[in-house]
Amino acid sequence: MSRFLVSKCICHSRDFAEIKEYAEEHGLTSVEELQSEKFCSCGCGLCIPYIDLMFETGKTEFKPGAYYKNIE
C-alpha cells in the first residue's frame, strides 16, 4: 500500500486544506467556481476529481485514484 497521498493542486501549489478553507470563506461549492476565481484547477486539471471529492466528503487528503476507486 502506498504512503503517498494526493493533497494539493500542483499547478497552483495549494494544499486541498487551503482550497477548502478558501471555498468555505467565499461560499464556493464547485471546482468551476474556484476556477473562475483562478484559485486552483486552471492548469493540468489532475486535481479536479480530487477537489470534487473534497467538496463531497470534506476530506483534504486522498489515496491516488480515490475518485474512481471509491477509496476512503
Image: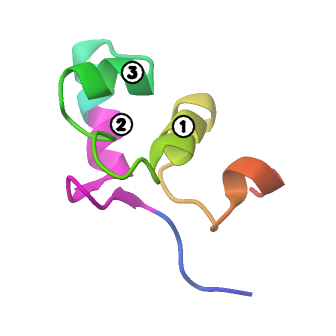
Secondary structure under badge 1? loop
Where does residue 21 sit, x and y in percent of width and height? 29, 35
Picture quarter with the N terminus: bottom right
Give the number of the mark in front: 3 or 2: 3
Taking depth in this image into account, of 41 and 60 the one nearest to the observer is 41
Instruction: Please name the residue shown 25% across and 57% down the image.
Output: 11
Residue 11 is a magenta residue: yes
Q: Which residue is mark 2?
A: 20
Q: Is residue 50 above or below residue 25?
A: below
Q: Residue furthest front?
A: 44
Residue 28 is a magenta residue: no
Q: Which residue is mark 1?
A: 58
Q: Which residue is mark 3?
A: 32
Kind of residue indicated by mark 2? Lys
Residues at circles 1 and 2 in contact by the CB criterion of under 8 Å: yes
Q: What colour-coding does the image apply?
A: rainbow
Question: What's the mark number on residue 43?
Answer: none
How far, Cα to Cα, is label 1 from label 2? Answer: 8 Å
Q: Which residues are magenta?
A: 7-21
Where does residue 46 sit, x and y in percent of width and height? 47, 54
> Which circle's residue, 3 or 1, is located before the other in the chain?
3
Please count the marks in the image: 3
Where does residue 69 sit, x and y in percent of width and height? 81, 56
